[in-house]
Image (cartoon, helix red, strand yellow):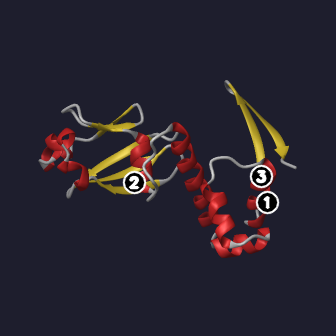
Amino acid sequence: MVRVRRVDARPGHKLALGFSDGTRGLVDLTPLLATAPFAPLREEAAFLEAFVDHGAVEWPCGVGVASEALYAMAHALQRPETLDQARANEREVGLRELRALAGATQREVSEAMGMDQGQLSRLERQDDSLGSTLRRYVEALGGKLEITAVLGDKRITLGRTR
């Protein structure tokens, strides 16, 4: 699961976040301050004391926000209710970030894969895909997909998917 690695609390009840998958985001927590659990953070001085603890954002007053919720807010995704939804959010961001890194649009990638843009959008949001589908996606971006198995401190590249 993706965790928060860095937090910078900013005026206006905003958090600048860095995540373990390398993505970043800015989250405005103002809407949460209207709810009782977040009342202690209404004072900006208290809000600015945010810190990272075990991948989540916490405050000395005992208030915290889970990494999955912050990740969804930072990337404009639906807030996950289940572990599967949290993993789907991570996968969607991963594919979008990969596409952005390649400088490609959904339209360009969908055309290269021989599908319409709606199908590609669903692929980027879906929580599981065949290795061959991911290979086609990465190849449409001009890359090559490799799979690496990690067992303890050992990393073994299994090679290209077929």
Q: Is residue 104 visible?
A: no
Q: Residue at x 38, y 50 (%)?
A: 17
How would you rate the neighbour count of disc 3 (Cα within 10 Å): few for under 14, some for 14-19, many for 20 or more?
A: some
Q: Position of residue 127 (x, y in %)?
A: 62, 48
**In x, y percent, where is residue 63?**
24, 35
Specify which label sits upstream in the sequence, 2 or 3: 2
The residue identified by callout 3 is: 145
Residue located farthest toward the top when viewing the structure as drawn: 152
Kind of residue sitting beneath label 1: Arg
Tell me if label 1 and label 2 are in contact, CB under 8 Å. Answer: no
Calculate the distance from the C-alpha at mark 2 to the C-alpha at mark 3.
Answer: 29 Å
Q: Amino acid at mark 2?
A: Met
Tell me, for residue 24, which label it has, or none. Answer: none
Closest to the observer, 161 or 20 = 161
In x, y percent, where is residue 137?
A: 74, 60
Please report the residue visible at 41 percent of the width from the left and 55 percent of the height from the top.
74
Residue at label 2? 73
Q: Are marks 1 and 3 in contact (CB under 8 Å)?
A: no
Q: Position of residue 98 (x, y in %)?
A: 63, 59
- First in residue order: circle 1 vs circle 3: 1
Q: Which mark is residue 136?
A: 1
